[in-house]
Image (tube, helix red, strand yellow):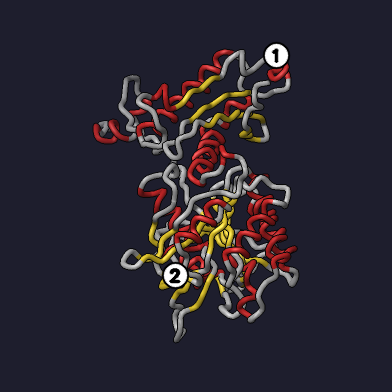
Amino acid sequence: MPVDDVSLSGRYRDQAPGVYAEHVFPPGEVRLLTGVPAFLGAATPRNGDAQEPPKPQILTLWPQFAQYFEASAAEGYLADAVRGFFANGGEVCYVLPLQGSNPMAALAQGLERLASLDRIDLVCAPDIMQSMRRGVRPTLATVQEMQWALLAHCEDCGDRLALLDALPNATVDEVCRQRADLRGGGWSGANGALYYPWLEIARPGATTGQYVPPCGHVAGVYARSDRRVGVHKAPANEIVEEAIDVQMRLTDVHNGILQTQQVNGIRAFPGRGIRLWGARTLSADPAWMYVNVRRLFLTVGRWIERALADVVFEPHDTLLWARIERELRAYCTALFHAGALKGATADEAFFVQCDATTNPPALRAAGMVVTELGLAPALPNEFVVVRLIQEVSGVTLTTPEPAP
């Protein structure tokens, strides 16, 4: 019986000696998304999909919120925040419904479930203010305790920033006291930013404008600014879409006070719209005073967690040090060319050191790999040095102790 040539070339070809071409398409590099918030608030999963405990639900479009959740406008601001996020250019967010009659306990449980979610870099909890929906102004003590929990969560995780809301109907003096009390909670405040005042929006079906906490809209502005320029740009002088007014009209004098107290004002400018007019963290450390600087370093830490995760189990030798330096230099060079770092040359914009000096025998015996990374952020004009310590548990960013 004659052998069919077509069958031979197809069915039996790989069994015959020879060299054959095989087209392989490697997967593209996974992009590290920034401006991805997690929203915590009062909501009930739809379609009987309630989970115990509920898990964060990813959303890429605003209509998906109604698809997955029921949220009463009379109880909280979660839906307003998520809608404001997408209205301002947000692309991806996570929503985690809080359950239970004790708001603080529910928030603590929700934050615990977010701890392992490494795809977020912002955290918003607009329903800290949910009692306003029932006509009761939340007390400073209540807000303070829950916002302390957000700051603690973000600092413990080390890869995210809390967007905090000022009290409703607050005066400039009251919001400055709120900021002072937040700084007194034992947390540095480097991973938190406070925004004031509330925004007026036109809610669907409402005959008058409604005031809502600004965190969701602010998160959308962050995402939009990140996508257009990058995390190294301060998210300020940016229009807040969907807002029709602010609860408190700030003057230049007001804004000057707020800036010195590290409260980020939201201002209404005739003919220019409503704009974010501040980009400061709550930190007293000058190195971490600006949102864009802190987020740049947090993003670098997130990149290292992903790109260099496999070095944890590599032999601790000069080859490992060289690899870490090589990959970090390539990443920082890309940051420099993107405008994230200042300097006429890459050498002026950053330095990377991973060698015997940063890894003495005691640290090597402890299983640590220490890399010193210095970045000169484009704004503001300061040079910040951090130590990157890689262990099995992850990457830790610390500022070196000053020389004696």
Say if mark 2 contacts mark 1, CB within 8 Å.
Answer: no
Residue in the foreground of this view, choosing between 28 and 122: 122
* Disc on the earlier residue, 2 or 1: 2
Quadrant hosting residue 99: bottom right
Please name the residue shown 68% across and 64% down the image: 143
Q: SS for tag 1?
A: helix
Q: Residue at x 59, y 69 (%)?
A: 170
Quadrant of image for the C terminus: top right
Quadrant containing the N terminus is top left
Q: Where residue 314 sits: x, y (%)?
A: 61, 22
Q: In this view, does 255 lie above or below 373?
A: below
Identify the residue at the far bottom of this view: 207
- Residue located beneath label 1 in the image: 361
Query: Crowdedness of circle 1 by 10 Å Cα count: few (<14), some, many (20+)?
Result: few
Looking at the picture, which amino acid does disc 1 mark?
Answer: Pro
Q: Position of residue 247 (x, y in %)?
A: 50, 72
Mark 2 and mark 1: span between their CA atoms? 56 Å
Asked if residue 106 is positioned above or below residue 366 in the image, the reply reads below
- Residue 63 marker: 2
